[in-house]
Image (tube, rainbow, N blue to C red):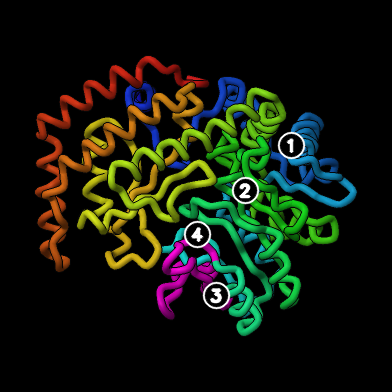
Amino acid sequence: MVMDKIFEIIKKEKKRQREELAMIPSENFASEAVMRAVGSSLMNKYAEGYPRKRYYQGNVNMDLVESLAQERILKVFGLNEARWGVNVQPYSGSPANLAVYNALLAPGDKMMGMYLPDGGHLTHGWRLDSRPISITSKFYRSEFYHVDRKTRVFNYAAIAKQAKKYRPKIIISGGTAYPRNINHKKLAGIAKKVGAYYLADIAHEAGLVAGGANPSPFPYADVVTFTTHKTFRGPRGAVIVARRDLIDKINFSVFPGLQGGPHLHTIAGIAVAAGELTTASFRRYARQVVKNAQTLAAELKKGGLDIVSGGTDKHLVLVDLRNLKLSGWTVAWALDKAGIIANRNTVPYDTASPYYPSGLRLGTPALTSRGMKVPEMKKIAVWILAVIDHVKKEKMPEGKKAVNRFAKKFRQAVDRDPWLKKLNREVTAFAKKYPLPGI
């Protein structure tokens, strides 16, 4: 039976997650309670519309679930219902952002977001030169602000100058690989001066904000979006929180503008996760995530790696490998074979291609969910440095054909590498000591 094969694959994936170290910053482990809610009978009900305004009958319990999720999101961030509205229906972060643009902008309006190779996100208007890549850059005119070339952090005076000249309708913050805190007060002030909305996309930091480990955008932003996995430790969904005077437009944009019936089983998982975020144990977890990331950054820096911005305030560490003349792709593949799962990533002012970038992105949310702390981070840093040292001779050649030949040959080589196999056994034995939440 087909289903038998699916469950066999799931079993293999559980084993992989148990035996490897998940260090991709956008990954985490949901609790057993969250997983029970998502896998519940709620997935059987169609609930098009909003609480008490459904298009189908039999939604009394769906209304209770969605309303509770909204209430808990407000509680998590300490928000007043009179000032803020919540939409928990977006299927993921990308449609959540698109719903905001669709509500607040007209086609052809200007948007200004963080440059993708500097750590920004595709949904913030990404285009390559004049060629639209994201659907957002097809509908809207996009321009990007950069990190400072020397410090590799934001220069808010330069952003203000750029915004004054460009006059966008919306300014967007939030990135997938920006390791420092974002000054929401300054960005909101810049937006206000040019008559723009300020959208804070805290997809990566939502749990850290809820846990008090990162600064909150809510006193300043017009709209805040975030995904509910990552540091939020929930299911794969998204939330939009907007000023009360904007939420009706945004609700209409989500449904019927972009989506049909909401996934109430996912929304139930979001509600459970939001409840967990209000606990003292989660606040301790959020602080430990940051402490672990800072420890990892410091240890890797001591080992000779170039840490972008010199450190981190969040859950992620970005390594620039150009001083070692290495590719992030090469190092990520070697780490994978050792049982350490990270991802290659662009770095500010990268000189390599996006597919074979110069950076390595590492995160601590999933490791911290398994109970790992500072001593474990130091041990893992030693392994990462050893793998990098092991592959130092494997430098990416120039030219597309040469790169493709090298990539194929390298992957075959690391599959057979006896040193990496030996390290993998050590990493596996270490990983098995730490339980997986929810699995």
Mark 2, residues whose alpha carbon is within 10 Å: few (<14), some, or many (≥20)?
A: many
| Residue bearing mark 2 | 226
Spatial CA span between label 4 and label 3: 13 Å
Residue 268 visible here: no
* Dot placed on the residue nearer the N-terminal end, 4 or 1: 1
Q: Label 3: which residue?
A: 142
Q: Is residue 95 magenta?
A: no
Q: Where in the figure is residue 224, as x and y percent of width and height?
A: 69, 54
Marks 4/1 in contact by CB < 8 Å: the verdict is no
Front in this rendered view, residue 37 or 373:
373
Observer-nearest of 74 and 46: 74
Residue 200 lies, in percent from the top left, at 65, 57
Q: Is residue 150 magenta?
A: yes
Mark sitting earlier along the chain (4/3): 4
Q: Amino acid at mark 1?
A: Val
In which quarter of the view is residue 363 placed? top left
Q: Earlier in the sequence, mark 1 or mark 2?
A: 1
Q: Residue at x 71, y 64 (%)?
A: 188
First-in-chain label (3 vs 2): 3
Residue position for label 1: 76
366 displayed left or right of 51: left
Neighbor class of circle 4 (other Cα within 10 Å; few <14, some 14-19, many 20+) is: many
Classify residue 425 as left or right of residue 262: left
Q: Position of residue 261 (x, y in %)?
A: 67, 45
User: Of helix, strand and loop, which one carries label 3?
Assistant: strand
Please provide the residue range marked out in magenta.
125-154
Q: Amino acid at mark 4?
A: His
> Could you tell me how far apart the alpha carbons at marks 1 and 3 are, in whole angstroms?
33 Å
Per the image, the residue denoted by label 4 is 121
